[in-house]
Each structure stands twice: as structure tokens, then as C-alpha cells.
Amino acid sequence: PPPPPPPPPPNPPKPPKKKTKEQLVREERAELAAEALKNEDPSPRTLSSLDMIDWEAVMHAPVEEVVACIRCRGMHHMLANRIQSLLRRVHRERGCLSLEFLHNCPTELARGYLLSLQGYGVKTVSCILLLALYRADFPVDVNVGRIMVGAPEHAMLDHCF
């Protein structure tokens, strides 16, 4: 009898899936956040610069108590969960509830760390950089950005997320 036919060649390896822009941005922000976390907190804050809110209590409070405190704001259920999640993340990563270390970070590392936080977008981060960290920045929302460049509505969506 004739010899059996040779086995078919193995399937060539599939090329890796191309990452979406959103995945690439998320990975870049995570890398910047990890780099920013290497910075130490500056000297302890003075009593006059401490927050009036006990953020530890907010972090550990039942979410319904946080909702009750911010109910007049609107979107209070989503925001209460987001606030507590943010507090837990900062505490887990830093061992305390402080973002003071961002003062010692280069602007791009601070921006990357803040953008890696759930719910923080480009405009919010620009406001924090400008108003809290005293960095030169120019907060622009989607509508203002669209007017500034004279672009149609869909043109700026890639830049504001």
C-alpha cells in the first residue's frame, strides 16, 4: 500500500490582536501611574492645610451614608461608589489617603496617575493640575475644544475621554 499522506503543516501562529486605542491609552496611563507611585510624599501637611473631611470615615462608611451626603449633587449612587473606590485604591497603593506625592512628580507622571483613576477625564485632570498642583495647564472640555479648532462634533471625540 502507498505510504500515508504527510500530516498537514501546523497552522501558522496567529498574529497578535491589534490593540484598540482605548487599550493603548489605558496601558500608557497604568505605566505612568506606576512611575508616579515611586515618588515619596513631601513633609506632613500642617494643621491649617488639612482637609475638613475625614476621608477615612468616608472610605469605611456604608455607601448609603455617602449617598445621603451628596444626594443634592445628582448621580449620587454612582459618585458615592466611585469616591469610595478611589479612596480604597489610594489607600491600598500609598498606605494613606494622600495624593501629596503628586507635587513631587513631573507633570506628565502626575497627569498619567490621575488619568488612571476611574472617572477622571482629561478636563478634570487638567483642572487638578492647574488648581491643586499649580502646573501650567489649560482645561478644555469637548465643546470648547470643538469651537477652538472649528471642527465638526465627531472630530474631537478621540481626544476627550
Image (cartoon, rainbow, N blue to C red):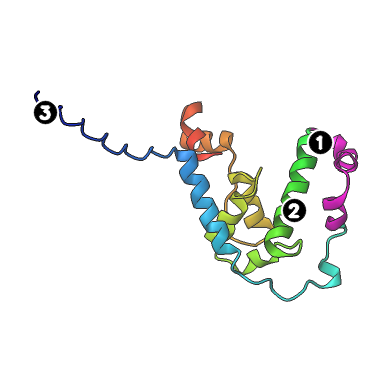
**Helix, strand or loop status at disc 3:** loop
Rendered-image quadrant of the N terminus: top left
Three-letter amino acid code at disc 3? Answer: Pro
The reply to whether callout 3 and callout 2 are in contact (CB within 8 Å) is no
Three-letter amino acid code at disc 1? Answer: His
Task: Identify the residue under disc 3.
Answer: 3
Task: Identify the residue under disc 1.
Answer: 76
The quarter of the displayed image where residue 110 is located? bottom right
Measured as percent of width and height from the top left, residue 112 is found at: 55, 54
Nearest the eye: 117 or 46: 117
Whether residue 142 is visible, yes or no, is yes
Task: Identify the residue under disc 2.
Answer: 88
Closer to the chain start, of discs 1 and 2, is 1
Measured as percent of width and height from the top left, residue 97 is found at: 76, 61
Nearest the eye: 150 or 96: 96
**Helix, strand or loop status at disc 1:** helix
> Quick check: is 63 in the magenta stretch?
yes
**In front: label 1 or label 2:** 2
